[in-house]
Amino acid sequence: MNKFLKELKDTKVINNNDIKRIKQYINIKFSKEDSKNKSYMLSSTIHDIINSKLEGFPSYIKKDLKNIIFKNTFLSGKDHIQMYDIFYSYINYQKLDNEQIGILLTWINNNIKIKIDRKDLEEYLIVEKIINPIITTNSDKLSLEKLTCDLDTSSLKDEVINNNTNIDSNINSKFTNIKEHNTIDIFRKLFNKSLYSGLIVLALFLIVFYVKSNYLTASTINKSSTQTKSVSCNKVYKHTLRIINPNIPKDITFSSINEVKLKNYLSTKKSMLAKEPYFSSIINSAKEFDINPLLLFAITGQEQNFVPENNEYAKKIANNPFNVFHSWKEYNTNIKDTSKIAAKTVFNLLKDMPKGENPFKWINKKYAEDKNWYKGVQSIYKELYNAVN
């Protein structure tokens, strides 16, 4: 029964070598194009390869599913995407009722040689505790939902996977527009009607126990309330990382800044990022990944001129002012998500920076196609530094 998993794990979608080869082809074939257009071609190609492997899934979930696939692979340090990564991302993202299990089964059988039946799939999902045993083909009861936390298009799939497709014709094909749709349901029914009476009795017991406990420990709770609030407030920074690299200048790693002065500076640019939730999200991500907030804001200045409020698409751009995964047009979630991705990217680059390197130029090597990108970021960073000091 688990043979289908092995086949999915053994089937490549794309890896870093494929991406390098596509990039080389674009640089040669479209040598006269500027770096942004080349980057867009690369980004579009990668996205379309992923899209080609999502055939069979509902169109309204493909964008969210693709983003989760990226987070589970490239953003988690993996250098490849296999068919299993798509399978894994789907079962941990989409609610698996009877209809969705059927969709998943069809997708699996369309992508493996040795077909499986629904019983095989359901047994696997039950063993892995993805669904309840009560889910069967003859039942319309809902499953338990496995909660989750919270690059680039054209059709080059055969070129990348089989190495025998005409890349040129595919790069020039139309780019796919995926309708945005959020399909994650947070709360669902956990038990069927036969358990209601038992739940009522249990609920009454818990209420009595809770009230009694509160009565007996009220003084203790009141005394520790201040400490509890403090812990709660600091929860977001519980897993703060540190860049352990003596080659990194201290002013590049996280330090507290004069936020009032920074907001005043951003206001002179009529920047959306001076407002919430944008401002705090960027600060929080900077702290979480030990990056000077000014560096992240400098990147937004270089990429999107700090997102002026009078821009027609300001609210959209403000969701991804770092242009992670190439562009805010292609990857548009929210500022909390994209600021974390940007901060994590910078963190991963800086932790391996050798001695004597310019940190801005070092980041440039992986963050942007434009070789002069770092000059703009460094200049903006210095301007921000002077503004807050």
Image: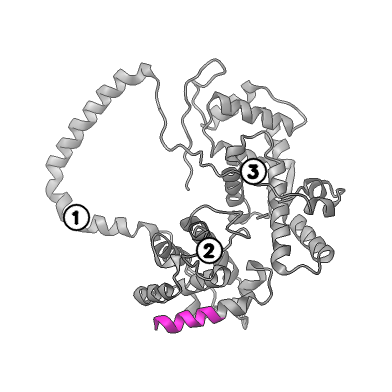
Q: Position of residue 254 (x, y in %)?
A: 44, 72
Q: Residue at x 47, y 47 (%)?
A: 149
Instruction: Answer with mark 1 or mark 3, whichever residue precedes in sequence.
Output: 3
Q: Is residue 380 magenta?
A: yes
Q: Disc 2 and disc 3: Cα gap in Å?
A: 28 Å
* Circle nearer the viewer, 2 or 1: 2
Which of the two residues, 155 or 176, is positioned nearer the viewer here?
176
Q: Secondary structure at mark 3?
A: helix
- Disc 2 crowd rating (10 Å Cα; few below 14, some 14-19, many 20+) is many
Q: Disc 1 and disc 3: Cα gap in Å?
A: 45 Å
Instruction: Answer with mark 2 or mark 3, whichever residue precedes in sequence.
Output: 3
Q: Which residues are magenta?
A: 379-389
* Circle nearer the viewer, 1 or 3: 3
Count of picture labels: 3
- Look at the numbered discs 2 and 1 and tell me whether their residues touch, using CB distance below 8 Å: no
Q: Secondary structure at mark 1?
A: helix
Whether residue 359 is visible here, answered yes or no, is: no
Mark 1, residue position: 224
Q: What amino acid does circle 3 point to?
A: Asp
Image quadrant where one finds the C terminus: bottom left
Mark 2, residue position: 321
Relative to 178, say whether 136 is above or below.
above
